[in-house]
Image: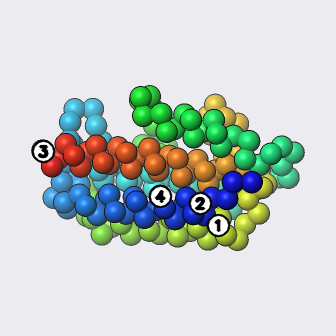
Amino acid sequence: MKEPLNDLNRVHQEFVQVLSAIPEDQLNTVPFEGSWTAAQVTEHAWKAASVDTLYGDTSPTDRDPGEKIKAVSDLFLNMDIRMQSPDFIYPSDKKYGKQELLDMVNNRFNKLIVAAKTLNITVTCLAFEVPGFGAFTRLEFIWFYIVHTQRHIFQLKKIAKVLAG
């Protein structure tokens, strides 16, 4: 079974580094037409990594608990695909300060890391299904959070480059 802790820690640190490098006065600036701001990308990634799903109802898993990791990774790490966010994790127009964003990211990842360390990650989560994939195990949800965050780190780097001129 593919253990997620090292990658969860790595993606957390990289997200914090990339976000920290964007000047505060540019966090809420739209870098180009059709783009979210860095703050909106951060809010979206934060909303998408719902720890509540991991603590919701579960059932025993009758398949490889990591069976869907490759398919999810292949989809979300394909930067040639433009995706549409579901409404419930769509970012708001709220203006954020850097410390507030960093606190959100750190708090969410700290909770994810605790969950990954303490919960049985082989059981299937019943509270939510990712459209197109069906029910995920806790392990698959954690990997979804990792690759989804990696996708948005890529987006933040692109935004930072454009804003830097």
In the image, 156 versus 42, the foreground residue is 156
Examine the rendering and report whether any part of residue 127 can be seen: no
Q: Is residue 96 above or below residue 68?
A: below
User: What amino acid is found at the position of numbered circle 4 in the picture?
Assistant: Val
Q: Is residue 151 above or below residue 101?
A: above
User: What amino acid is found at the position of numbered circle 2 in the picture?
Assistant: Val
Which residue does the image show at 76% across and 63% down from the upper left?
Answer: 120
Q: Please give the residue where the numbered disc 3 appears in the rendered image.
A: 165
Work out how far the residue at label 3 is from the one at label 1, CA to CA, in angstroms. Answer: 40 Å
Q: Please give the residue where the numbered disc 2 appears in the rendered image.
A: 51
Which residue does the image show at 32% across and 57% down from the upper left?
Answer: 18
> What percent of the width, then of the height, locates residue 21?
25, 61
* Disc number lying in front (3 or 1): 3
Dots 1, 2 in contact, CB < 8 A: yes
In the image, 105 versus 53, the foreground residue is 105
Dots 4, 1 in contact, CB < 8 A: no
Q: Which quadrant is home to the C terminus?
A: top left
Label placed on residue 115:
1
* Disc number lying in front (4 or 1): 4
